[in-house]
Amino acid sequence: MSASESREQWGSRSGFLLAAVGSAVGLGNMWRFSYLAAENGGAAFVLLYLILTLFVGLPVMLAELAVGRGSGKSPVAALAHFGGAAWKPLGWLFVASGLLILSYYSVIAGWTVRYALAGLVGFGGDAAGYFGEVSKGWDAVAWHLAFMALTVWVVAGGIKGGIEKLALVLMPVLFALVVLLAIYAATLEGGAEGYRYYLSADFSAIWDRKVLSEAAGQAFFSLSLGMGAMLTFASYLHRGHHLPNESLIIGVSDFAVAFIAGLVVFPLIFAFGLQSLVSGSTVGALFITLPTAFNAMGSAGMVVGTLFFAALVVGALTSAVSLLEVVVSSAIDSLGWPRKRAALAAGGLIAALGIPAALDTDVLGLMDQIAGNVFLVLGGLFLAIFVGWVMDDPIAQVSEGAAGVRWFKLWRALLRYVVPVLLAFVLVGSLQATFEAVRAFME
Ligand code: TRP
């Protein structure tokens, strides 16, 4: 029996879709999206992010799904399958991105677990002080390790028995919580000011290069693109799937959750007059402002705060398993390891890599800058070139299960001309910002 014959498969279409949406929906939708939107002109950023999701994100998503399903392999082998051994380094870049992103993502996830538990008893008096205590040091290391252990446990359970099962149970809970929270936020007195801030645009921001770079980086991060996560998930798909529809469902769900999360966060911030806290801190924005609001709400704040952070934990876990799966499936395919050993080894390595980020939030911010804005954009750029120019007949790959779709030529043209040019432009800006961040960090 060849490797591809014995390859695992998703148990059902909804199982795959919920797992893929689970990968996309995560800390990025709430933690990263809300502070970036606040920083970059509110609705102007949201609009730019929507446009980039449609014209760059979805074509790249479809490209990842096509390469994954077409090859039935994990990233390194999948790229070699369609492009020869010269393309293996791109696969290794994907694996490296997975290692790097999960190592600090898990630290933030550890904070959220701690906050969800702390919410049960109220967040103490001083949210900024609490964040300062919780976000770094050996306590943060311990929660990071615990979260990694949970992630390893799910991934060791396999595609159907681990990742899919988790998504089927938890994703409906997450949707329900987010909608419930948005309805609650709509009842807050003084929240209208928050909607106004969130939904009214400073459109001059659209022409700002930094806003474009951050919106593009965010589109990739939020859709889990640029490091082979969707590619890997698609490698467990059968040929009957209509890949354009699947991309659209994943993209729309991800945008919807990010957008609704904004409808929760901004009214809360304005109802409690916490605007100045948002702009003050970046990685900590959400973890300081919201608990301040929850504190001010008394016992209702305990309930709402616990539910909010529980939703975040769910999002973080279903995303973390997809990041780990990229590394694990590569170890299974390249080293021939059994899944359990691969999950333990990859998880252990990532846990160790994350320790510096758990000890120092500046290190964490720098890792996010490098991985999110440089590695993912670089990965997306090369993947677009790969599918647009190198792969033999990408349209044949996406057409399977999607007969009658007439815009595949347009898709290929986007991958050939529009996506690479735009991403190259974005990359220059991201590199500049990253060099500046590294320099500031060194000082
Ligand atoms: N998309 C997830 C979020 O928004 C994070 C994530 C999971 C991710 N897998 C990824 C980001 C792969 C980039 C690449 O929180």
Image (cartoon, grey):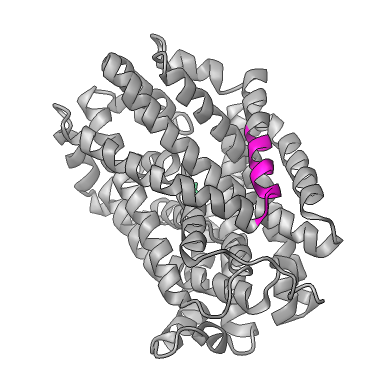
Query: Which residue range is magenta in the image?
Result: 147-158
Q: Nearer the viewer, residue 170 or 189?
A: 170
Vertical arrangement, residue 21 with respect to residue 395, above or below: above
- Please state the horizontal and vertical placement of residue 5, each as a whole percent of the image: 74, 75
Q: Nearer the viewer, residue 186 or 167?
A: 167
Vertical arrangement, residue 8 with respect to residue 301, above or below: below
Which SS type dominates the magenta stretch?
Answer: helix
What's the residue at 44%, 76% (across, down)? 244
Q: Quadrant of residue 72?
A: bottom right
Residue 306 visible at all: yes
Is residue 372 rendered to the left or right of residue 278? right
Vertical arrangement, residue 246 with respect to residue 191, above or below: below
What's the residue at 35%, 49% (across, down)? 257
Is residue 65 rendered to the left or right of residue 150? left
Q: Quadrant of residue 262?
A: top left
Q: Nearer the viewer, residue 44 or 241?
A: 241
What's the residue at 57%, 43% (across, down)? 368
Q: Quadrant of residue 107?
A: top right
Q: Nearer the viewer, residue 307 or 60?
A: 307
| Residue 70 counted in the magenta span | no
Locate the N terminus and report the quarter of the image it occupies.
Answer: bottom right
Locate the C terminus and report the quarter of the image it occupies.
Answer: top right
- Please state the horizontal and vertical placement of residue 11, each as a whole percent of the image: 56, 64
* Total numbered labels placed on residues in the image: 0
- Please state the horizontal and vertical placement of residue 220, each as a whole percent of the image: 49, 58
Q: Residue furthest top?
A: 125
What's the residue at 42%, 46% (across, down)? 29
- Please state the horizontal and vertical placement of residue 246, each as a whole percent of the image: 44, 70
Residue 443 visible at all: no
